[in-house]
Image: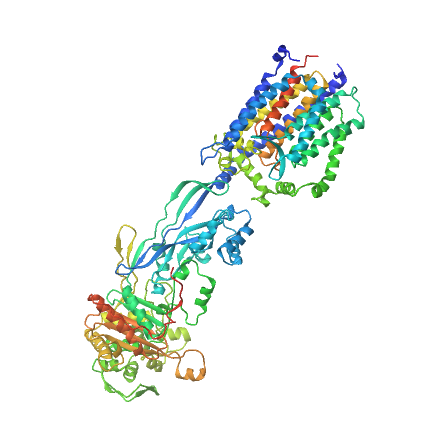
Amino acid sequence: MQNGFPSVDHRKTRRLLALFQVVIALVFAVLLVTFWNFQVGQHTRFLEMAENNHQRTLALRAPRGVVFDRAGRVLVENRYSLNISLVREQVEDLDRSIRLLALVTGIDEQAVRDVVDRHRTAPAYRPIVIIRDVSLAQVASVTARKLELPGVVVEQIPTRYYPTGTLAAHSFGYVGEITDTQLAETNSEGLRTGTIVGQSGVEQSYNNLLMGADGTRHVVVNSVGREIETIGEAVPVEGQQIQLTLDYDLQKATEDAFALAGYAGAAVVLDPKSGDVLSLVSLPAYNPNAFALGIDHNTWNNLNTNKLNPLQNRALQGRYSPGSTFKLVMAVAALEEGVADPDFKVNCRGGGSFYGRFFRCHTTHGIVAMDEAIEKSCNTYFYTLGSLLDIDQINKWATAFGLGELSGIDLPHEVQGLMPSTAWKQERHGERWYPGETISVSIGQGQVSVTPISLAVMMATAANGGTRVTPRLLKAVNDGSGWIPVPVTPPRSVAGLQPETVDTLHRGLWMVVNREGTGRRGRILGRDVMGKTGTAQVISLRGREAVGETDLDLRDHGWFVFAAPKDDPQIAGVVFAEHAEHGYLAAPVARHVMETYFAKQEGRLLPTLPLPSRPPEIVSVAEVDNP
Amino acid sequence: MFERRLYIYIDWALLAAIVLLSVIGLVMIFSATYDPTTDQVGTQFSRQLWALAIGLVALAVCLTIDYRVLADNSLLFYGILIALLTYTLVFGEEVGGAKRWIGLGPVNLQPSEFARIVMALVLATFYAQSQSGLRTVSDWVLGGVFVVLPFVLIAREPDLGTAVTLLPACLAIMVFAGLRLRFLAAIAVAAVLIAPVVWAYGLEDYQRTRIASFVEPEQDPRGAGYQQIQARITVGSGGLTGRGFLQGTQSQYNFLPVAHNDFIFSVLAEEQGFLGVLFTLGLYLFVILRSLDAARVAKDRTGTYLVVGIMAGFAFQAIYNVTMSAGLVPVKGLTLPLISYGGSSIIATLMGFGLILNVRMRRFTN
């Protein structure tokens, strides 16, 4: 027994073994406590982490509602665009992936890096859109290097599409990712970063109808993010379809006529009975398709710094003096306030003295009655009416016709014009109103300023005999269960005009176009067009001398307000021709619109215009290629 | 050497516990390699089944030959081991930058897995031979030299994890052979002192990354710390009763790397819950304590030292792996003996138990 135990040695061994066993048992006890702590104590927390690990909720973007014109023609729709996105969770070497992706798609590496940086706080499993609306060639080159580009995916998403390009851009507006400010608003529930919302036009005012509801897909993914199965899906709900009161043909006719005339400007064409907006133009326009995919920096800068300000909707946001178009409000005020009757005559000797100052007329009209005064736009006649009325009476009737008021159109960001009054003067300048100021106001100068749409409302009110209609663009809504017409927006006010007031007014406006007046270029045989021209001074004579040589365009603007036919007006509106210098130069635009309207009504071939002799560069500033 | 009556002394309870753990291992390997998308099980399952069968035969062989005969030939085995390790280092199959396997047609042999048993046999024999309990310094140095050679060879593969498992076995035998615990403490102090030097010069980059990520796993959740976090999630999401066989989302959707190997216990914890953990750890504790009992009743010091050596390595590896499964220690390529996938590992482990049963069985023989 050479290897046998000496007894002392044996006892020591047994003690060591016992120690060994106790230590191991203790270690196992500690392990069990640890596992108990993880598996029972912190089970809820770890289970949640496990769920988050393998379950993903992916957003499915809902297509926005299609927009139709009043005849059912598609104005705004959706197309599917391809995006190249990056899922960081599946990327091992982000830096390398970015470099390779930029190389393969031929875009700037720094741009890719910026996009990724901007989204660094978003969950790593959510795809970050790197390039929007990629070409098929780019898709092919990315797909070909799929193995080298893990986590790079091609997504197909519905994208807003405006098939008519710049047409009616300001009415449609545009869409874009929701801004942080919008997110902070209280009614933004259910919206999150990256949601596409309307940012202007009907896209904005009817965003709630158009937006629909994004869907979600609940999927199980494995550790490399590959989808194993779908365990739940909420199908995206397409936005509601809406029908606008706009008439595509009239809209196009208006813009075509503008292009031929070569002016920037605005036009609003209404149905004077209902307030339906048949055409609404602001030029130059932008191409809303440029926004649909997220506008790029250069285009956005160009739109914002452009001197012609294409983003501004002149029809609602431009404020100009009404010039002679204001005279029809003066006529109504005088007749209704009883300071003059239709036969009231004034002898025009090239102007007149009021409150110690001489006010000029363009020429010597001799003795004129009210209808002739309107026809010839005789300043002396309306100065005289202004001396018989006080400013608050004028204000009352201007307001009844919508001047200095918001029209209430269903578009965002409408700007209010200004119709002065004694109260206004007191509040604004702390001074009383001087009667001499009323004389300037009576020919639409001085403090009065109007937006084109308010002049369109004025003309519609004049045409329909005193009902101040509310312009509206939304005609009907289809939530999927059929079209439901939207009731006409109630008029803002109804003035009970005496029949002879309307009669005189209509006769005078008819004579402007059909006799010796300034609106002859708006005449259409057999249509009894009514109209009135006006000139909006950009700067006063004295101001012009003070400015001297300047790059600014200081030429006056031209107005033409119109309605037809005289006995039962069906169409009314305004054309505002920027820097046209004369109102009569705006009249041909109105005539083409009305001709188109009547041709369409009678089912005749629509009138055509000769092509503009020079390229209408002011028509569109942000032209993008239509995809 | 072959005596029929010896078989009544076989520790059937220990053997049953060992086989039960191996079966649990098979079931867990099935789950960990199951692919829910294709409804198929990995080839690892059948390979492990074969390895288990071979291992049981090897166990029987190790049981049958008197351990004293084996001890007498321990230097021969040592020579074979060194030869195989050297061969591996030169001609081994290179996988992932490491040469750990010798290719043998359809199967691979991992010689380092057998090093622990051979070392236990060699050191047990070596220290049992000295007549007195008194040791000279040269005894410790010589014992150390025996260890250093295979340690360096394995560490050079490189497979530091497996190399390190040699140490507890050798230290345990030395302690039982009379190495003073005070001396061990001195070694520990020395280790702490040279740790910075090792950190700077002795470790590969990937080893440094592993240790760094252990200290702060959230620093790099997609890199090395990822495994630790995922291991904790896997274990914690199991709850009391587990998520059910093949129902663990962490293991089924591959959130754990090498789930059938390093992290097999995490899979068990996820799918079988705390109750499964309790049962399995209970079996392990039983196996270890019962085996150490064989050391107590052993006929001679060779037997005692052999059992202690084998068990120290086994216990160290089991405890380390279970701790790692809960994300509590740095991830090392250390398998859970009996349960983790690995043919060489299970065969070597079963051979080790063959020797332990051998020692116990022959406690009355001369």
Q: Position of residue A56 (x, y in %)?
A: 45, 43
- The quadrant in which residue B201 appears is top right
- The quadrant in which residue A360 appears is bottom left
Say left or right for A372 vs A36.
left
Question: Which quarter of the figure is the C terminus of chain B placed in?
Answer: top right
Q: Position of residue B212 (x, y in %)?
A: 64, 42
Q: Position of residue B118 (x, y in %)?
A: 68, 25
Residue A389 vertical position relative to residue A86 in the rendered view, above or below = below
Display coloring: rainbow
Q: Position of residue A488 (x, y in %)?
A: 26, 61
**Of the pair B315 and A365, the residue shown nearer to us:** B315
Question: Which quarter of the figure is the N terminus of chain B placed in?
Answer: top right
Residue A578 vertical position relative to residue B220 in the rendered view, above or below = below
Say left or right for B115 vs A79.
right
Instruction: Tell me what residue is drawn at x 66 percent, y 21 percent.
Output: B292
Say left or right for A64 vs B26.
left
Answer whether residue B275 is visible to the viewer in this image.
Answer: no
Instruction: Tell me what residue is drawn at x 63 percent, y 38 percent.
Output: B98
Say left or right for B310 vs A337.
right
Answer whether residue B251 is visible to the viewer in this image.
Answer: yes
- The quadrant in which residue A486 appears is bottom left
Residue B355 vertical position relative to residue A487 in the rendered view, above or below = above
Q: Residue furthest top?
A: B5
Residue B170 vertical position relative to residue A398 in the rendered view, above or below = above
**Of the pair A531 and A181, the residue shown nearer to us:** A531
Q: Residue furthest bottom?
A: A349
